[in-house]
Amino acid sequence: MTSGLIVQIAVIGTFVLMGLGILSMVVSGIKGLVQGKQDFKRIALISTPIIIFAVSYFALNDVTKAGVMTTMGMMAIMVVSIVFTGLRGTFKF
């Protein structure tokens, strides 16, 4: 076996394991939603990066630029939430 073949098998195995992990998380999330263990606020909060990525991908038609825009958007949301939390703690509202 050449080292190229070993690397190829390792990469394919990694992607298969990642796919199985993502699939199990989706199934577990759907199961929790059906059983009433999850609320829609948590689902909306976790799906925010996916929504931002989808919108930026459809607007830019480039995966790399969409990834950068998603990162920048999530950082902007983080800064706004930190400022809001600080203001809320300062003014007690």
Image (cartoon, helix red, strand yellow):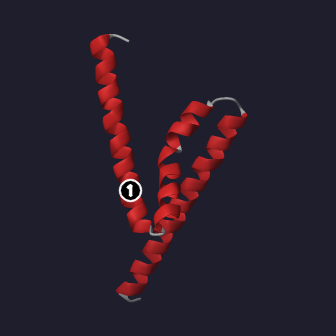
x%, y% of residue 67?
40, 60
Residue that sits furthest to the top in the current view: 92
Quadrant occupied by the C terminus? top left
Q: Which of 6 and 35 is in front in this view?
A: 35
- The location of residue 48, given as percent across then percent down, is 50, 44
Which residue is the site of mark 1? Answer: 69
Task: Give the camera-side residue of 66 and 5.
Answer: 66
What secondary structure is found at the residue carrying circle 1?
helix
Confirm whether residue 78 shows in the render.
yes
The residue at the point 44 percent across, 67 percent down is 63
Q: In this view, does 4 lie to the left or right of 13?
A: left
Residue 29 falls in image quadrant: top right
Count of marks, rendered view: 1
Q: Which residue is drawn at 36% across and 52% down?
A: 71
x%, y% of residue 62? 45, 69
Compared across the picture, whether 35 is left or right of 54 comes to right
Apparent side of residue 35 relative to residue 79 in the rendered image (left or right): right
In this rendering, does residue 38 appear at all?
no
In the image, what residue occupies the spot 65% across and 36% down? 32
Q: In this view, does 12 lie above or below 76?
A: below
Residue 16 pos. (x, y %):
54, 66
In this rendering, the answer to whether 85 lies above or below 19 is above
- Of all residues, the one furthest to the right in this rendering is 34
Give residue 78's quadrant in the image: top left
Up-down relation of residue 83 to residue 8 (above or below): above
- Residue type marked 1: Met
